[in-house]
Image (cartoon, rainbow, N blue to C red):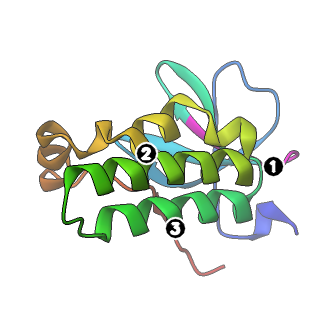
Amino acid sequence: MDLERSGLEPVDVPDHVEPTYRLGGWLGEDVVLGGDSGRVLLASVAGVQLLGSSPRQFMTLVSLYVTLRRSEFSTRYKEENARRSLTAWARQIDQPAGSSPSWTAAFDGDLDRPQRCEAEARGEPALPAVVHREP
């Protein structure tokens, strides 16, 4: 695929050698696609974190997180059990990304805290938001 003609916005990520293209945002930071590697990365002021070894693996992890967020649990124990299971699945689907600080925080519930809900109210998504542009 010719990423220059895809409609994705090229983004300069400091200290990153491959060309990168903005897919969207997550918690106020850019989610980018590595043009050479095909990896999905979180480009933040703290550095670059792997969110998915491929777009397919990234979207699978997003789907797991969406499923978790939309689930209603009858007890705290059941929720904690589901979080442990999804964390294990994430690491089986994409070991390096599923073990990253971003996904660990998501599946541990750190993104469910009230301050994150306030961030969503300000328009900052708690879920990765992928931008779709027509080419």
Relative vertical location of residue 36 with respect to residue 65 in this rendering, above or below: above
Q: Which residue is mark 1?
A: 35
Q: Amino acid at mark 2?
A: Phe
Of badges 1 and 3, the one in the foreground is 3
Q: Is residue 125 visible?
A: no
Q: Amino acid at mark 3?
A: Ser
Residue pictured at 53% horizontal, 73% vertical: 132
- What x and y, as percent, mark residue 134? 59, 81
- The N terminus is located in which quarter? bottom right
| Label whose residue precedes the other's in the sequence (2 or 3) | 3
Of badges 1 and 2, the one in the foreground is 2
* SS category of the residue bearing label 1: loop
Residue pictured at 21% horizontal, 50% vertical: 76
Give yes or no for contact between labels 1 and 2 (Cβ–Cβ under 8 Å): no
Span of residues in magenta? 36-42
Q: Is residue 78 left or right of residue 118?
A: right
- The C terminus is located in which quarter? bottom right
Residue pictured at 67% horizontal, 44% vertical: 91
Magenta stretch: residue 101 in it?
A: no
Of badges 2 and 3, the one in the foreground is 2
Q: Which residue is mark 3?
A: 63
Using the image as rendered, state which of residue 17 and residue 70 is in the foreground. 70
